[in-house]
Image: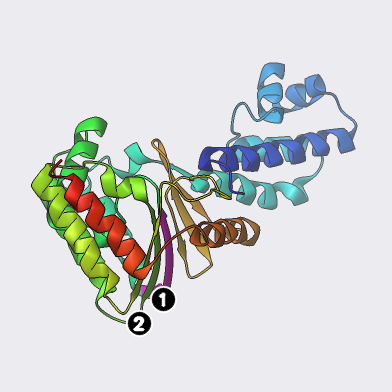
Amino acid sequence: MPTHPSARVQQAREALAARLRELRLDAGITARELATRCQWSESKSSRIEHAKTPPSDADIGAWCRACEAEGQTADLIAANRHADAMYVEWRRLQRSGLRQLQESGAALYQRTQLFRVYCSNVMPGFLQGPGYATALLSSIAAFRGTPDDVSEAVAARMERSRVVHEGNHRFAVLVEEAVLRYRIGDTATMAAQLGSLLSAIALPSVSLGVIPFNAPRSMWPLETFTIFDGRRVHADSLSAAVTLTQPTEVALYTRAFEELAHLAVHGSEARALITAALRALDG
């Protein structure tokens, strides 16, 4: 089953470090000799080999020259860049505010035909109403200390969410029952959001399942993730947005989604859970 996104990134970096170590061993030189040839410290060689310090493109070039394996340089640099691209800090994405982050995914949303979405903590972004989105993005902006462009970010999110009603898009959505109960915003905001979720069940493009609290778990709760047309996965953590495109990793998340889908209820049973969450707001 899928591991935490940061673990996937670390695995990619460790795989690259192992390839560099193999080059050194194949060349028959010690870590000290490699450091001498590269004109850096032996400790730097050790940090790179043990995936403690990500190498730069220049470091990889020097390493390959030292091992007389220049033909490996381009491939190793590509692997290094892929590992870096997998892990994109939220702070970098959000440095100019939240609006840009919302707009950045618009093209991907437009070209995706099948979305498979699992949410364990908040409502799916494209099913969020303005009030809920405002409350959520306001808390994110405050926590991150990003520029306050929440109004613009909410407008961008609502614009991006039009894909639910337009074009040839299909959405298979799973939410944990806890998502219905977490209070994002005030009572009125949650009531409006749960009402919107009830309306979403009737949309022809949306299949909405809720995983009950008491479902016998054959699959544990995971981080929120989205699968785009079976080719790409976005998985979210507190510190990062991770993009996965390797077929084996996408297949792993697809399998996880299928396992989670077996736990979910749909139709009238899903509506009953949403309605119960609505009633609980008055409690």
Name the residue nearer the viewer: 258 or 33.
258
- Distance between mark 2 and mark 1 Cα atoms: 6 Å
Taking 250 as reference, is 193 left or right? left
According to the picture, the residue beneath numbered tag 2 turns out to be: 168
Residue at 58 percent of width and 50 percent of height:
218
Name the residue nearer the viewer: 219 or 140.
219
Taking 268 as reference, is 194 left or right? left
Q: Tell me where residue 185 appears, x and y as whole percent.
A: 15, 42
Q: Which residues are magenta?
A: 111-118
SS at badge 2: loop
Crowding at dot 1, Cα within 10 Å, few <14 / some 14-19 / many 20+, comes out as: some
Task: Choose top left, top right, bottom left or bottom right for residue 193.
Answer: bottom left
Residue at 36 percent of width and 77 percent of height:
169
Q: Amino acid at mark 1?
A: Gln
Taking 246 as reference, is 102 left or right? left
Name the residue nearer the viewer: 136 or 186.
186
According to the picture, the residue beneath numbered tag 1 turns out to be: 113
Residue at 56 percent of width and 58 percent of height:
259
Q: Tell me where residue 81 appears, x and y as whole percent.
A: 56, 47
SS at badge 1: loop
- Relative to 69, does residue 54 appear above or below in the rendering? above
* N-terminal-most mark, 2 or 1: 1
Q: Main secondary structure of the magenta part?
A: strand
Q: Are marks 2 and 1 in contact (CB under 8 Å)?
A: yes
